[in-house]
Image (cartoon, rainbow, N blue to C red):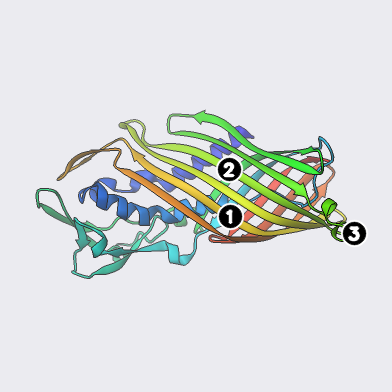
């Protein structure tokens, strides 16, 4: 399963085609302006991934018996809203980059935005020597067209173990995987605890109620041009936190489940290596960005159990809505 998750990660990052992003042209305006520009351009990817990996932590509010286990593969798709396909470029936010037509602001494509030349306004870049060049803003990555949808996919493998006092320990773990084009690792931990046992009137109700607390840490690096520029890489690290009150009801082979709570993420994106520009010289490790977000989260789902096999799907409403599918084996 760990190998499959790593392959999914590599396929996703290859699909993004970061190598198509003309970072050198953005760096003509200097690193400060490049950081401001790239923060708006990459935001939907960071927000979508941060919201997405918080999906799939549970498929029932019923805890395991002592030392019961489950192991599952989780696939998430965070929906990127139409409003996130562009970001606002304001001349006042930049020192050496401005709109060519003299406008004070414009909507530019994000990484999920349009690749059409007509949707890419001309920008003027001025280097430290006062030399200027003009070129169209960088296009979207083509990810929306490649996937067919504006989504940020993610995948996890998760193990659950029943402990004492109706408590489940959930672990997400992939040790560091390295290849010619990528590095990837993840570790996450969650605690789900039955609440009915502590509340006299609730323990008589015909459904299960639990609380879930979960944290996840994903570290990744994609080498942009492993053959010709081996130092150039995109480093992407994300930490997430989730708290929800859960409820579920078993109906024959089906279980209806849902929860409400909060979801948050913190991500850092670093562009590493040496980048050469035609006007402004070389830049080393030019981009370092931080993203964070939090929102209320509510989800509802349905699972089906056939002997030891459990298959489920749920939909979460939050900052970026997330659809999750889980398949695994449960031994309660």
Q: Residue at 25% across / 53% down in the picture?
A: 33
> Which badge, 2 or 1, is on the more N-terminal residue?
2
Residue position marked by numbered label 2 in the rendering: 216
> Which badge, 2 or 3, is on the more N-terminal residue?
3
Local packing at callout 3 (Cα closer than 10 Å; few below 14, some 14-19, many 20+) is few
Residue position marked by numbered label 1 in the rendering: 263
**Looking at the picture, how far across and down is residue 255, in whole percent?**
80, 55
Residue position marked by numbered label 3 in the rendering: 204
**Looking at the picture, how far across and down is residue 39, in whole percent?**
36, 53
**Location of the C terminus (image quadrant):** top right
Q: How far apart are marks 2 and 1 (CA)?
A: 11 Å
Q: Tell which tag, 3 or 1, sits nearer the viewer.
A: 3
At mark 2, the secondary structure is: strand
Q: Can residue 54 be seen in this view?
A: no
Q: Residue at 53% across / 61% down in the picture?
A: 319
At mark 3, the secondary structure is: helix
């Amino acid at each position: 399963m760990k190998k499959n998750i790593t392959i999914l990660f590599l396929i996703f990052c290859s699909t993004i085609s970061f190598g198509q992003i003309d970072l050198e042209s953005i760096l003509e305006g200097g690193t400060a302006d490049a950081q401001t520009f790239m923060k708006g351009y990459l935001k939907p990817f960071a927000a979508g991934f941060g919201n997405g990996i918080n999906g799939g932590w549970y498929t029932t509010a019923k805890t395991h018996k002592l030392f019961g286990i489950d192991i599952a593969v989780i696939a998430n798709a965070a929906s990127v809203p139409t409003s996130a396909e562009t970001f606002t470029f304001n001349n006042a936010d930049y020192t050496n980059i401005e709109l060519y037509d003299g406008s004070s602001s414009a909507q530019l494509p994000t990484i999920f935005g349009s690749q059409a030349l007509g949707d890419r306004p001309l920008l003027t870049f001025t280097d430290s020597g006062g030399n200027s060049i003009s070129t169209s803003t960088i296009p979207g990555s083509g990810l929306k067209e490649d996937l067919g949808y504006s989504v940020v996919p993610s995948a996890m493998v998760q193990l659950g173990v029943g402990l004492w006092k109706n408590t489940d320990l959930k672990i997400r773990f992939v040790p560091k995987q390295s290849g010619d084009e990528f590095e990837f690792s993840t570790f996450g931990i969650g605690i789900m605890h039955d609440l009915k046992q502590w509340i006299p009137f609730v323990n008589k109700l015909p459904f299960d109620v639990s609380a879930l607390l979960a944290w996840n840490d994903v570290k990744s690096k994609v080498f942009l041009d492993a053959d010709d520029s081996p130092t150039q890489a995109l480093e992407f690290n994300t930490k997430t936190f989730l708290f929800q009150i859960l409820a579920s009801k078993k109906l024959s082979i089906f279980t209806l489940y849902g929860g409400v709570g909060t979801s948050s993420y913190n991500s850092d994106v670093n562009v590493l290596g040496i980048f050469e520009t035609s006007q402004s010289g070389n830049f080393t490790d030019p981009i370092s960005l931080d993203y964070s977000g939090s929102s209320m989260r509510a989800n509802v789902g349905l699972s089906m159990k056939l002997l030891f096999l459990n298959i489920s799907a749920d939909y979460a409403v939050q900052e970026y809505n997330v659809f999750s599918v889980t398949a695994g084996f449960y031994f309660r």
